[in-house]
Image: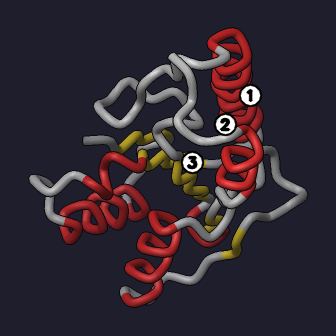
Amino acid sequence: MTDIVSSQKRSLMMSGIKSHNTKPEIYIRKQLHNKGFRYRLNVKKMPGKPDLVLKKFSAVIFVHGCFWHGHNCKYFKWPKTRPDFWSNKINNNKDNDSQVLAKLILAGWRICVIWECAIKNKEKLPKDLIETIIDWLYGIEKYIEISS
């Protein structure tokens, strides 16, 4: 199947996709900030540059896009064009994610991975999502993954 837009237009569209300050990230940040939590953003010296670092809780939060990180949910579909390129790209992202998590766990950090689908999911109220994160922060669990 051929693309419905020109390669130049597709390139322009793809270059507009952000890696930081995405809508899901901003939503989580605002909700946590409103609840009194303070954090650092994208700390470059840490493996994987976590989206949020809550040093007080020895916790990091990643907000992953379902497509870019190959999440097994309704928002992820393998592209039909250039399947080898996308397979390598997404599988490399997944491998990198695993390595980053291992390094952070080894360094004593607690990790929360929030998938984009958890924020888009209309059945689970956003308040429940934030309460789940807050409960985790005050708890002792080393790793939590939140998805739809």
For the residues labelled 1 and 3, the Cα–Cα distance comes to 18 Å
Residue type beneath disc 3? Arg
Q: Helix, strand, or loop for circle 2?
A: helix
Q: Using the image, determine if residue 24 lies above or below residue 65.
A: below
**Left-right relation of 16 to 116:** right
Q: Position of residue 135 (x, y in %)?
A: 30, 61
Looking at the image, is mark 1 or mark 3 earlier in the sequence?
A: 1
Q: Which residue is mark 2?
A: 105
**Amino acid type, callout 2:** Ile
In the rendered structure, the answer to whether residue 37 lies left or right of residue 11 reads left
Residue 22 or residue 113, whichever sits in front:
22
Q: Residue at x 40, y 40 (%)?
A: 145
Quarter of the picture containing the C terminus is: top left
Query: How crowded is the residue under tag 2: few (<14 C-alpha within 10 Å), some, or many (20+)?
Result: few
- Among the two numbered marks 3 and 2 on one chain, the one whose residue lies closer to the N terminus: 2
- Residue identified by numbered label 1: 96
Instruction: Give the labeled residue for mark 3.
Output: 110
| Residue at position x 57%, y 83% in the image | 38
Label 3 environment density (alpha carbons within 10 Å; few <14, some 14–19, many ≥20): many
